[in-house]
Amino acid sequence: MALTDRPVVILGAGINGAALARELVLNGVSVVLVDTSDMAFGTTAYSSRLIHGGLRYLEYGEFSLVRESLEERNRLLRLAPQFVRPLQLAIPVGKRSGGWLPSIRRFLGGQAPAAERGLWLVRAGLGFYDLYARDSHLPRHAAVRIGEAGAVPVDPQRYRWLCTYWDAQIPYPERFVAALIEDARVSADTSGAEFTLYTYHRVRAVRDRLEIHRVSDPSGQPVRTVQPAAIVNATGAWVDLTLEQLGVITRPLIGGTQGSHFLTFHRPLAEALGGQGLYAEAEDGRPVFLLPWDRGTLVGTTDIPFHGDPAAAVATEAELDYLVEVVRQLFPQLDLTRDDVHMHYAGVRPLPRTGGGTPASVTRRHWMEEHAGSGAPMYSIVGGKLTTCRSLAEQATATILRRLGRSPTANSRNRPIPGGESYPADQTELQTAWQRLESRFRLPHESIRSIWTLCGSRTERVLEALDELPSPCLPSPYLTGPYLTGPYLTGPYLTGTSLPKSFVRWVIRNEWVTTLDDLIERRLMLLYDPNVSPATLDELGELLVASNKLAGADAAHAVSATCRRLQDHFGKRLCDSTESV
């Protein structure tokens, strides 16, 4: 077999692995993508869900990273509008001057204690940010006084101004990863390359080959043996553990830190934000974001050293108390408490290991670390973030192809993410598109909106492919907002949601679903829905059984295990099926 006929094996189906798989397949390179868990299981699912240029990177002199990030932010707003949306952020400021000397020390590579930044310094940074954004169609930064119309009502005793600027938000990066993998599958049909995804599988190195085994059957026969053209370790926070399992001897590459977030449906807080995000600093100088989330608010993040298996990372009580206190300092009049936290999550950032410095000072750049002595060219991806996944993939593809004696023949710079094609130009056109789908398929507005959130402009094709559509008898008074305001009828709809069960069956068949957790956390995004109840989980278990993904005798155990995970790992409260938020 010629070297160029062999597949590239990518380990890790998170944002970087998925983007790289897509880029390679576009260039006619066969890819085998393997993950020991589900796609988007790791850091991707536990981020702050922002697509941003990295405003604070300016303070550390990382101008090229800011420029690259802003270019990619603008590109994703254009190519993935179903997932990436503009977001106005506000920075509370309490004084006119201050913070210059610590900022200069950080810029020069030194360490500096936390210091409050004044209005002039913040506006100077935002001016550079606007300059680097270049062709962005987003508004430039501005400053308003606390109390002016449209200003977020932060504590006027502590703050005097708000400096506003624009970035972008990606509420569901898990769905973005699924779309990248779908595009790799579609592209393989036209490029002549092979694309295969193995979730819940691991690899074992045997001479110049890799054996792919089911995680549930590690001692059995491999499901496939591959002689790779190259191997890419894109396992993020697991990079060092993966290298150890493959027997690769190298210096430690990852020095990850834990970042935790919580989601609250505290209505006064959401109303105070008014659809804007808030970028504030805690007393210790850590940046904390308060981000709109439908009718709720996402708050994060922390930054503490982490050791051990990244899958075991869970938000601690100390971290949650810390984040709640930041909100209380910003909005003392709202009286947010720990009891208002609906759920939380924690992830480990795949930061490069350094000899010192604060976590905030560690670079967010990415690079490919080559490992000598392997039977095939082998690389580990170190660093990276959601925003730059596409540019990372393009750069990594060029590196791999050059090593294989080839040159890139294609790139994804102008290729829409599936579901972003022919996307409505504005909110009016979007509402018109939804109304047309409601009329054609005789589905309630909230069902169309929910499916569109997951699938974008592919919604019509997906609905056409459903094996059946629910009867149009759902009572419209219950469909008045992002979440239900009354008890939902069971039957053709998934309890507590506006999703037709036929759509759930389609997702199970077409989106590489293996477990109940896959459906809850990374396909239907019900993890973040306050109306999920035990009845919802029971019905999903039944649908998995009907789709031969789960044995009937195992359904009750699977539902029980998922309930425990939702409580222990996420602190999520399951809804009483007779109530809703």
Image (cartoon, rainbow, N blue to C red):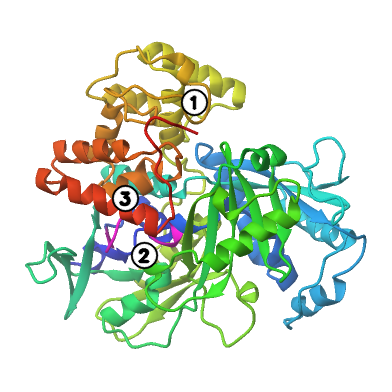
Circle 2 SS class:
loop
Q: For marks 1 and 2, give the one nearer the viewer.
A: 1
89 displayed left or right of 569: right
The secondary element bearing badge 3 is classed as helix
Residue 300 found in image quarter: bottom right
* CA distance separating discs 2 and 3: 50 Å
**Residue 482 makes an appearance in the image:** yes
Q: Position of residue 201 (x, y in %)?
A: 21, 62
Q: Earlier in the sequence, mark 1 or mark 3?
A: 1
What's the amino acid at mark 3?
A: Cys
Range covered by the magenta-colored residues = 32-44
Instruction: Tell me the tag on residue 563.
Output: 3
Where does label 1 land, which residue? 485
Q: Which x, y percent locates residue 131? A: 77, 54
Please report the residue visible at 21 percent of the width from the left and 36 percent of the height from the top. Answer: 543
Where 430 falls versus 504 (above or below)? above
Question: On the image, numbered disc 2 is attached to which residue?
Answer: 406
Camera-nearest residue between 426 and 38: 38
